[in-house]
Image (spheres, helix red, strand yellow):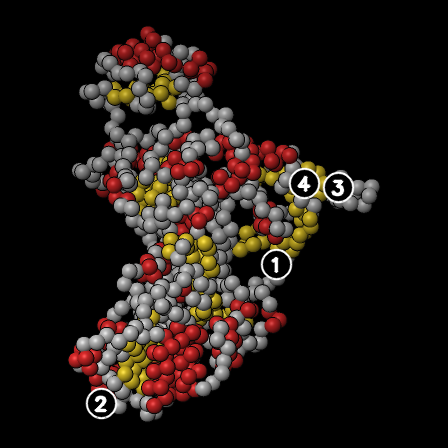
Amino acid sequence: MLTETMSTAATIETKPQPPPAEKIKVKVDGKEVAVPKTTPDPVTGKPLPTSMIQACAAANVIVPHYCYHPKLPVAGSCRMCLVEFGTPAIGPDRKPIVNPDGTTKISRALRPVIACATPVSPGMEIYTNTPAVRLMREGVLEFLLINHPLDCPICDQAGECKLQEYSVDYGNSESRFVEAKVHKPKRVELGPRIVLDDERCILCSRCIRFTRDVAGDDALGFVNRGSHSTLTAYPGRAFDNNYTLNTVDICPVGALTSKDFRFRMRVWFLKETRSLCTSCATGCNIVIGSREDAIYRYEPRENDAVNSCWMCDHGRLNYKWIGREDRLVEVRKREAEGRGQASGSRSAAPTWSAVLGEISQKLKAAEPGSIAIVASARQTNEELHLLAKLAKRLGALTDSVPRIAAGDKLLLNADRNPNSTGARLTGIAADPMGSNLPAIAGGIRSGRIKTLIVFGEDATKCGIDADLLDKLELLIASDILPNATTRRAHYLLPGCAHAEKRGTFTNTKGRVQKFLKAVEPRGDARPEWEYLHELLVNVTSRDGIASIEGVFNEMAKEVPAFSGLTWATLGDTGISAKI
Amino acid sequence: MNESHTTEPIPNALLSQPDFAVPAALAAEADELITHYPVKRSASLMLLHAFQDHFGYISQQAVVWIAARLELAPINIYELVTFYPMFHQKPVGKCHLKICRTLSCALGGAYELHEHFCKKLGLDAKAHGPQTTGDGKYTVEFVECLAGCGTAPVMMCNDTFHEGVSLKKADEILKGRGQ
């Protein structure tokens, strides 16, 4: 990340720095790398001796592994990460022996060790690619495959299976195992969202450690012994916390599958798009898996400043609304009561340009103070900024709608809006959010407010009742799904789900993160920032760059909290703004 | 896809014990055992032994009770019960014959001894796991090494250790237990 390009207003998120750790120099496959003597435990944060696999990762050498996961406590059960190593030979004088050519003499260890659970020591040399290491990997893999079904073509994990991948690298093309395989339970319902195929399980215990140590719900375990060892939840106790689907992500094989996703799409057909979860203010980084403009799944994307490698089930499964049949897909214009019905004629379908032109004229003609805007904290920073500029030009009273529900201690925030911070920073939301809504309702009631612009919210659910909406001279609504407000709108502008456009959100801690477009918008729907930009150009006769990059960079110049940010430097994991 | 037709609930390997009740003395023993260890969880095996001594086997209710007492999830205790064959998942006979079948005893005639007991008691010698007679008096079972390799074959009848068990000696043992 480019720290030096950042101004003081925006800095990369940094945790309080521990005292500089003592460094150890080791060699990985001949390449020297300096690693800290200790590394914090991923769960407790307690310093633990740096392991060989961490040193290898620092040297950009990937050691094949199943049970090791950088964010989980070490188990050391799969034996796939066996490596050879050597340490400096020590002479009788307790000093390292020096070779005639001046190099330190290395004494090779007689036995291999598992890289995930062996600490590094100064001068250690790790060999990850010797003939012996490759033979050991082949041996471990052959053992793992003894009882594993060899039916990859019908397995839902195919294409993203570590067993499959390493079999290509280290496996035999044919099994030498002629005896009967041990049979175990198939299609076990561990919980409401998880299905387990025990025959595919390689007993790595990643899921057990995740749910015990990260999710804090000690729900899974191994029963029976030896070849009959079986992963299970306690009978009658469903594996049902808000983080169960992460076990599907970290399962290296096809044992744990998501009920929602299994057998719905082969993974190699999925297009992967970097995006954000919109279900709460945490702003978990995700990857959207889509094919032919249909979304099939969300998966967490690693961002240590936000969500580590995890996301909650609530957010992960909250994508189906994007593909709902009743999505708003056309620009609509409702004639004033009576007129349209009396004439009995249907006018031609309104077009974006015609409607935006008409709205611009009406807004320009409106008397100052007669307009109010209800924005949504589900909109992007760019959209909220454009709305705030429009509001300033029109002298409009603005606010957005708080959305509070129960949160949890891990990732799920009580604030269920993805961009409450953005709404605050761009100035569209009142402080506290929602405190202007009664004033807007009162203004309509008294007749002072004649025009209401509602973006992405149902005004009738935040204190502006349907009969108040009917009093308005002009109601402009932009939304994705129909509601009581969109049905009453004089102008209805169909908007986009986040997966259908680009933009940025600011999470609850002030991290500005961008998301990219995964699927095409439905019908005539357009990204809100596009038509907001057009409206603003029409109403204020201003000029501006009609691109998301341009809008973002302009916003960064105008909103103090975002100063110094540019679309390009946000990168994939975002930057923390000073909030 | 409707998954409800394709998934199966998880069966419990243990029996349900509807009349399960922990007498005060057993609860006190459990609490005393827990004090032997720096971490409560370490007392798991000792509590399971105490419960097996009292009830004769480990039931679903016992697992839940022990787990709650040790502040653990039931799965942690359930894992142990299914791992160790020394914990009984159903009641065993009043006379529990445990015949060693590790190498020395296997060579010394453990299989013949096992078959002899099974024949005498009308049990299936080929069946897997502990076999109990219909009247609930006798259970015959193979176990692993009882540490008497020099005097193979060896066996235990409840807590009594028998060495060099010939078929004749086997009959005497049974006779001593009322057969």
The answer to which of marks 3 and 1 sits earlier in the sequence is 1
What residue is pinned by disc 1?
A21
What residue is pinned by disc 3?
A105
The image position of residue B174, as x and y in percent, is 27, 13
The type of residue carrying mark 4 is Gly
* Residue drawn at point x = 32 percent, y = 22 percent: B128
Q: Which numbered dot is residue A446? A: 2
The answer to which of marks 3 and 2 sits earlier in the sequence is 3
Select label 2 or label 1 by which is in front.
2
On whether disc 4 and disc 3 are found on a single subunit, the reply is: yes
| Quadrant in the rendering for residue A412 | bottom left
* Residue drawn at point x = 65 percent, y = 43 percent: A126
Q: CA distance from mark 2 to mark 4?
A: 84 Å
What residue is pinned by disc 4?
A86
Secondary structure beneath label 3: loop
The answer to which of marks 2 and 4 sits earlier in the sequence is 4
On whether disc 3 and disc 2 are found on a single subunit, the reply is: yes
Up the image or down, A124 lies above or below A373; here it is above
* Neighbour tally class for label 2: few under 14, some 14-19, many 20 plus, Cα within 10 Å: few
| Quadrant in the rendering for residue A490 | bottom left
The type of residue carrying mark 2 is Ser
Secondary structure beneath label 1: loop
* Residue drawn at point x = 34 percent, y = 61 percent: A322
The answer to which of marks 2 and 1 sits earlier in the sequence is 1
The image position of residue A388, as x and y in percent, is 40, 81
